[in-house]
Image (tube, rainbow, N blue to C red):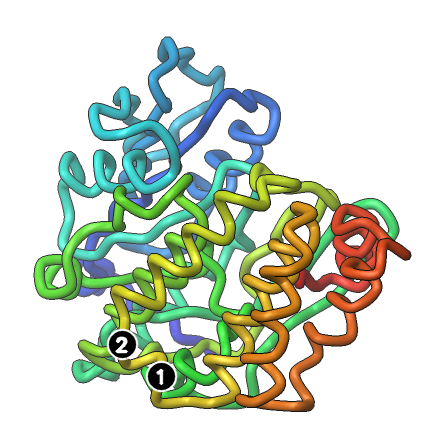
Amino acid sequence: MTDRPAAGAASAYPPVTVVVATRDRPGLLERAVRAVLDQDHPGPVECVVVYDHTDIRPLDLPVPANRTLRYVTNHHSRGLPGGRNTGVEVASHELIAFCDDDDFWLPAKLRRQVRLLAERPDAAAASCGIRLEGPGIAKERRLAAAEVTLADFVADRVMEVHSSTLLIRRSTWDAVGPVDEELPGGYGEDYEWLLRIAAHGPVVIVPEVLVVVDWHGGSFFFGRWAMIVEATRYLLDKHPELAASRTGLARLHGQIAFALASGRRRREAIRELGRVLRLNPREKRVLVTVPVVLGLLSGEQVLRLAQRTGRGV
């Protein structure tokens, strides 16, 4: 049995704009854009590549029928938030998806998500399973739940709902607002935006793995400890609903404690750890922060060990 349309019914499949924000990674970008253009979604697909304050360099890629490839320059603040906001502003269609330039989609991604979103008018967005691929790792992460709610995101980041999996309606974008460009360093912009999306409606999940996430063991934020502390505190101030979950609050304060310890602000880290223990004595970030406070490991070493298992701190 198939969910492809009958002959002549392709017009029932709505058009989609896909925003790909890029910094300057032409090889990875080409892979991501090719996968967007090769989607088996029967409706039109527009791919908007947003160059982050760099010269536009068109890709040497064939553009199939019913597909459009456009290039624009980020005219918002530098970084992913500004790039995504620029892409949505110029998007032609009512359904909007996002893909990071170092990730890529499997062919059925849009078709499966468009169908699910049509079946769930109450949903604010659609996501799907992911596969982490990189040196020494090939790991699938998928959710058993049919949807993720605001309460779920408050309690946990739910890493399976990755930015490269998201498909939203323009009405959702208009209701919740753009990606926050005020977040220090742009750190955690996807989680902050997901909190607003989930407050508007649930994120529904296609259970299959449809997105491959490049897991290269590094990050733009690697070692930027002071900025991570500032951004996480900004998030807590902006979203008082995070206080509704002791475990979720402990997780975020645990991240602050780890970043403080990694930045050699040990006294502050110890005070933050006390707060974490009062909220949730079993918070796992206590165990990884204590060796850093004691000088037995650096924050960078702990992160590398965690990333080998497909996780962060």
Residue sitting at 49 percent across and 72 percent down?
A: 157
Residue sitting at 24 percent across and 69 percent down?
A: 196
Q: Residues within 10 Å of mark 2 (few under 14, many from 20)?
A: few
Image quadrant containing the C terminus: bottom right
Q: Secondary structure at mark 2?
A: helix
Residue sitting at 40 percent across and 63 percent down?
A: 191
Q: Examine the rendering and report whether any part of residue 59 can be seen.
A: yes
Q: Is residue 231 above or below residue 38?
A: below
Q: Nearer the viewer, residue 84 or 206?
A: 84
Q: Position of residue 204 (x, y in %)?
A: 36, 79
Tag 1 and tag 2, C-beta contact below 8 Å: yes
Q: Residue furthest front?
A: 267
Total label count?
2
Residue sitting at 50 percent across and 70 percent down?
A: 252
Q: Quadrant of residue 7?
A: bottom left
Q: CA distance from mark 1 to mark 2?
A: 6 Å
Q: Nearer the viewer, residue 90 or 92?
A: 90
Q: Nearer the viewer, residue 292 or 304?
A: 292
Q: Is residue 97 above or below residue 255?
A: above
Residue 243 is labelled as 1
Q: Quadrant of residue 118?
A: bottom left
Residue type indicated by callout 2: Pro
Q: Give the residue at mark 2.
A: 240
Q: Residues within 10 Å of mark 1 (few under 14, many from 20)?
A: some
Q: Secondary structure at mark 1?
A: helix
Drawn side of residue 179 relative to residue 140, left or right:
left
Q: Position of residue 306 (x, y in %)?
A: 78, 61
Q: Position of residue 301 (x, y in %)?
A: 83, 49
Q: Position of residue 268 (x, y in %)?
A: 59, 60
Q: Examine the rendering and report whether any part of residue 1 can be seen.
A: no
